[in-house]
Image (spheres, rainbow, N blue to C red):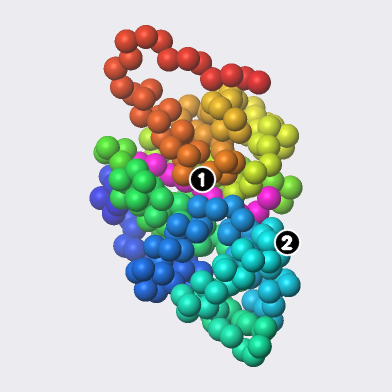
């Protein structure tokens, strides 16, 4: 990873976002945690855990999961050492400094790229002296190519045009072979975020067209993808990577063009 960044004129020596992650320390628990993170209900559950981190009760955690499922998730967090039991029916997060799900989502996406697609991946990079701040959520290498993923744990209504602009600024600095803007939601991208990318491309005079790859996965520029997490983060990451790598392989018949609808 350091070499790939250095070849792009960027010096990185392992600097990361110092905020602790909601990730177990022991390997077995960490692997189980990664398996659970594939489920959208578990990711929403963890957001509620963080929202009530100093005074947790099971009743706080049943907005997106049944009581039985939430109880199972909570038992796992206790067994994994992420949550402590304070008294009967009352819990708290062990690491009070964790106040956002964002870093944990970055970790999960990097772990997914490693485990599912054989990419060397890292997360939460802080690249000193890089233009536009040097904050990169996930950077991976596969088949000699650099993959950049910006992750958003907030819903689309909380994403503003400046974040799309900042993403494209970081793409311009890093010059990855492909870049993904991943929003952890099952809501549609077409309603708000596709128009944001279109507007930003027009503002920069890029000449890009936004075209639907499939479902709510969009190619918003050359090798730049916008995707949500419906039905599954792993599947949607795989669809973007397949579109990128197949586009560089030998094709005996023309590839079907993405749809603009």
Residue closer to the observer: 176 or 10: 176
Helix, strand or loop: magenta stretch: strand
Name the residue: 58% across, 72% down: 74
Kindly check if marks 2 and 1 are in contact, taking CB atoms under 8 A apart as contact. no
Q: Position of residue 12 (x, y in %)?
A: 34, 58
In this picture, is 227 found above or below 4? above
Extreme-front residue of the structure: 68
Residue 150 is a magenta residue: yes
Name the residue: 39% across, 42% down: 147
Residue closer to the observer: 15 or 56: 56
Callout 1 secondary element: helix
Q: Position of residue 65 (x, y in %)?
A: 67, 60
Q: Which disc is residue 211 wearing?
A: none
Q: Quadrant of the C terminus?
A: top right
Magenta span covers which residues?
146-155
* Residue count near mark 1 (Cα–Cα under 10 Å), binned few <14, some 14–19, many ≥20: many
**Is residue 227 rendered to the left or right of residue 67?**
left
Q: Which residue is mark 1?
A: 233
* Residue count near mark 2 (Cα–Cα under 10 Å), binned few <14, some 14–19, many ≥20: few
Q: Position of residue 245 (x, y in %)?
A: 36, 29
In this picture, is 48 found above or below 162? below
How far apart are the two marked residues, 2 and 1, measured between alpha carbons? 21 Å
Residue 135 visible from this viewpoint: no
Residue 152 is a magenta residue: yes
In this picture, is 85 found above or below 148? below
Q: Which disc is residue 63 wearing?
A: 2
Q: Position of residue 61 (x, y in %)?
A: 68, 68
Name the residue: 50% across, 38% down: 236
Residue 63 visible from this viewpoint: yes
């Amino acid at each position: 990873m350091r070499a790939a960044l250095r070849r792009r004129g960027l010096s990185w020596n392992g600097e990361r976002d110092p905020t602790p992650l909601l990730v177990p320390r022991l390997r077995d628990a960490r692997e189980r945690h990664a398996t659970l993170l594939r489920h959208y209900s578990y990711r929403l559950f963890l957001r509620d855990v963080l929202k009530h981190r100093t005074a947790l009760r099971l009743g706080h955690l049943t907005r997106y999961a049944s009581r039985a499922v939430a109880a199972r998730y909570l038992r796992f967090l206790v067994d994994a050492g992420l949550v402590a039991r304070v008294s009967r029916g009352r819990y708290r997060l062990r690491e009070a400094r964790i106040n956002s799900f964002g870093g944990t989502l970055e970790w999960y996406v990097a772990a997914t790229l490693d485990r599912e697609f054989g990419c060397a991946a890292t997360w939460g990079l802080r690249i000193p002296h890089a233009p536009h701040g040097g904050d990169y959520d996930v950077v991976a290498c596969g088949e000699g190519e650099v993959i950049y993923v910006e992750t958003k744990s907030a819903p689309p209504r909380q994403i503003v045009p400046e974040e799309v602009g900042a993403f494209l600024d970081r793409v311009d600095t890093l010059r990855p072979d492909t870049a993904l803007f991943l929003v952890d939601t099952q809501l549609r991208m077409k309603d708000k975020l596709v128009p944001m990318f279109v507007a930003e491309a027009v503002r920069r005079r890029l000449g890009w067209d936004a075209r639907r790859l499939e479902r709510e996965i969009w190619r918003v520029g050359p090798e730049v993808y916008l995707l949500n997490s419906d039905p599954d983060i792993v599947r949607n990451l795989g669809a973007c990577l397949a579109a990128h790598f197949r586009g560089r392989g030998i094709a005996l018949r023309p590839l079907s063009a993405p749809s603009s609808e």
